[in-house]
Each structure stands twice: as C-alpha cells, then as structure tokens.
Image: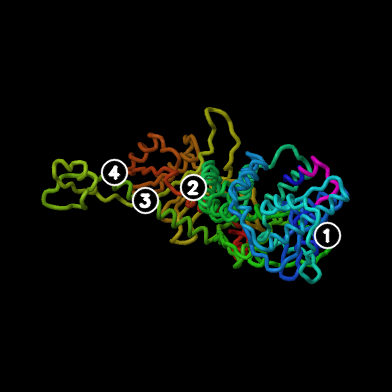
Amino acid sequence: MHVKLLFDAIQPDCVAVELPETSQQAFLHAASRLPDISIVQTGNQIYLCEPCDAAFEGLRCALEHRRAGYCIDLDVEGYPLHQDFLPDPYSILHIGLQAYYEAYEQSGAGERKNPLDQKRELHMARRLKELSLSYDKVLFIGGFHHVATVLNLTSQSSFESLEHTKREMARVSTLTEESCRNVMAEYGWISSSYELWREHSKDGLLDRQKLLYHLYKASAERYRENTGNPFLGYHLRNIMKFVRNYAFIHHRLMPVLFEVLCAAKGCVDHNYAYETWALATHYPFRKNIDNLEELNLTVEQVWGCSKHIQFHLKQKRRKGLEFQQRKKDRQNVRFRPPSPFSICSYPPEDLIIEKFGDFLKKKGNILLSEEGMHTMPFTTSLEDGIDTRETIRHLHSRQLYVRIKGQPPAAAGSVVVIFHEDMNEEGRFIEEKYPWKTTWHGEHTQESDMAFYATHIAQNVVGPGISRCEYGGLMMSYPPRRLVDVWHDPDYNACISKAELLLMAAIDYALKPLIVYVAEKPPRTKMKAFAARFGKKVVFIPLKSLSPHMRNKIRVFHVLDGYDKREIAGDYIF
C-alpha cells in the first residue's frame, strides 16, 4: 500500500527492488501478471508473487507507468532465513512509516549481520550507484535490515566486483485454486481488498481491523443462508474480543488467519468457521489467462511450516475441506407435492427432534422437583444429602443442614417450543415470518404427533423435491396418532397468538399432567389457570437457558415432497 502511494507521489524514473538480479526477467514477467498469482522457481528457491508484496508491487507500478524496473540483489547460495522481532506492521497505520522505522533502528535489530549480508548490500549499493548515473529519480524498495547500509555505501567511488551464484533458468508458473487458498502470504480477503482499493480509490489507508470486521459480517450472512442458524449480535462482539486477545498473547496487534479461524470456531461453531475460511481464502483475481502451468504447492513447500485446523461440519464431507453437498441450482429444482398428504420429513432430523423432546421432559421434571425441595437441620437422617450452602450460611451455629426433595413430579405429556411468537405488536400488522401451519402424525410408536408453524414450505428449495424450513414454534404430544388439525379447531379461536394455540392444544392432548413450555417469556396466567382446571401444570423453561448450538440444531428442518426423496435427501441436506 505504501509502495503504491509513494510511487504516485514521487513519480520515479525507475524502480529498483531487493530481488536477485539473475532472475530479473522472470520477476518482471510475474509482476506483469498481477493481480494474478505467480510462482518463480530458481532451483530450490521459490518466490511467491502476490499483490501485497512490496517488491513485486514496485515492479508492477513501474510496468504500468512504462518505467524501468530492476532487480539489484546479489544471488547467493545458502542464505539463512532471517526474521526480525518487530512490532506489528499494523501500527504503521497509526504512527506512520517513518516513526516505525525509527523504532526499528533504535532496537538495534539491523546491527546483527550475516557475512552474506555484506556482499549483498555492497552489490545493491553498486547497482544503485550505476542507476543514479542514468536516472534522475530512483525508487529503491528494500528490507529494513539492509536499506540504511545500502544507501550509505552508495557514497563510495569504487566497488568490489562480486559474482552471482549460477542457477538454472527461472521458471514462472501459477498456483491451483486449492494451493492459492493455502499458501498466500496475505490471505485472499486482504489481497482482494487491497486490489479493489488500488483500482478504485486511493483515498486514505486500508484498515486491517475493519477488513477483519467486514470478513466476519460477510461470513455471518453466508452462515445464515447455508445453515439457517441465526447469527446473534453478541457473537460478533465475542469474536472480535477473542481474536484481539489471541493476537496479544503472541505480541501482535492483529491476528493471523489461523487465529481468525480459531476465534470463529470457538465463539460460534465449525460451520461458521468454515464460511469464514471460505471467504477469507477466496481470491477472485486468479485467472491464468496465459495458461501457465498450475502447481499444487503445500504450505510447507513454500513457507517451511504450517498450522492445521479441522472443521467438523454438520454434513457429509471428504477428508479435505471441500463441501460434498451437491450444488444448488434453484432454477432447475422445484417443490411440488402431489397432495398435502404426500409430504414427509427427513428421518435423521426426526431422531434429533424426538431426543430433544425427551431432554426437555426430563429437564422439566428436574425443575419441578427443585421447586419442592427444602432444607432442614440434621437430626437423625441425611435425607437426600447435605446442603453445603445452607451449612456454610449457618456455620456459626455449628449445625449441619440436609436437603429434602419434594414429591417426585409426574411425567410430561406434551412439549411446546416457541422460537418466535410471530404476532402483531401493539395492534400493528406485521407480515408473517412463519406462515405455514400444519399438523403431522408420528409414523410409528417411537415418534410423537406434532403441530407447528414455520417458514413457507417452498420458500427455500435446496434440491429436487427438498425444501428447507425453519420452525417458528412447535408442539409435540405423546403417544402418536391422536392429534387432529389444531389450526382449524374452533375450540382454539380465542387464542391470541399461534404460540398460545399450541400451548392450549398441548394441554388438551397431554395424557400426563406436566406440559413443558420453552419460550422467551412465560405464558399468560390465564393459560396456567386453564391447565389447572384439568389437573395439569405448565413448567416454563426460558429459551435462553438452552445453548445456541442446541437451538440451531433443531430449529431448521427439511420437508420432502414424497417418500422416494428420502433416498437422495442426504446429498442435499447438511
């Protein structure tokens, strides 16, 4: 970014960069292909040419403005990998490049030299001296470790002649899409953002923190679309705080891609982390219009080391990171059930919802049991165990307290879960988000009858005869094969909302005295009184007490327009 701004500001006559002189033609070829990605190979040496590399950006600017571009470094063999311990380059955005370089000089990191550095710096100084005799303004792009010494050496009047290491002819190639995702020094989202900034607007500087924020937001949109799960406001707040602290642990201001993905996976789930990875590593400017050889290089081949992250997606997949789900072409697939009686559910999702209903029944029993629990001083029996909290509270009296559970609650006969009430607010009409209302019967004795309201049956078609829907609310009643169409039952005309209708139906059809009601707010007192008239009790469980992962897992379901679609549904559902 600073190279481009500097080039536009001073308009040099030529550009000199710290790249081996022996492969100058190959490097210029690679720079001319930008923003496409190139690989320059000279024997065992591999150079990655990408938009955010300062040296290749300098050559690119020279080529675009028809200025001369030169590679002036000495080609040496066996140069060790060198990395200075520097502050995060993100700080340049706030303190400026000059202040950043002055801090580097004060640290003394540039004083530690390798014997090969002296030869390289002397050769670069000689080439700069020669270029200064032919051009009025020369832009030199070099590393912090060499630039000061090179500029000082240019004052010499004579230079020692040094020879380059003999190498094979440099070969220019490109990367496959998979390899490009993995080996770019600046992952695709950053490189693409820089390329857009470079082409359309150079006002101000790119803020890496804002780019990361927009990456997480864009990933959230794809996450909602592909999974149907909500992305709540606190998710983004937690992710940004997590990733900031993760970077601080490693003495950086901004995180690397591995930390970006770990934050997404830890604060939301694996599917969201995958969407973040897919967007972060996508690079749309890879074209290969000149048909160069495509190499499938690994991170280890290019950079020498790597970190691996795995995504346990909610779907079938191969060992790699690619979706095995069939491509959705919504123009070619339709959802056309022959009749309302031909639609059916997807059996694996039936198992999930039935297990969830059993879990809620047990949870309701536990809550009701705790309501009747009380404590008393220990006399002759420990009853149901020592109550540690009460014992500590009365420590001054040196008296043990024990718990006594209430009468074991009766079993639950119905379960109601309300994700969204979908009702008018203060007399104002709002468009229904969940207009589809229906009743399903269990196919066998292990399934319950269900009544629910959800998104439209054909709103989101994901395959031939396969539609993805989202529950607004549901009611499950045991045993099956007893439920009539509650949505057209005149006994429920007085209900003020769909959620209340489901609760009243759950009370009516429950054969056991408990009804578990899960929602954001408790039911009206009128509904509790209605249940009491029939000797039943409504146990309220706040929706927020259930984990977001659990809510997301059951809220989305799929409808098939015929039993024959069950054979292929697994290829389209995840």
Mark 3 to mark 2 CA distance (whole Å):
18 Å
The image quarter containing residue 46 is: bottom right
Which amino acid is tagged 4?
Answer: Glu
Which amino acid is tagged 2?
Answer: Leu
Q: Earlier in the sequence, mark 3 or mark 1?
A: 1
User: Which of the numbered marks, if any, corresponds to residue 29?
Assistant: 1
Mark 1 to mark 2 CA distance (whole Å):
63 Å
Q: Which residue is mark 4?
A: 371
380 relative to 538 in the view: left or right: left
Q: Which residue is mark 2?
A: 474
Residue 251: image x %, image y %? 54, 50
In magenta, the rendered stretch is 6-15
Q: Which residue is mark 3?
A: 363
Report the mark closest to the observer, 3 or 1: 1
Q: Is residue 334 visible?
A: no
Q: Are marks 3 and 4 in contact (CB under 8 Å)?
A: no
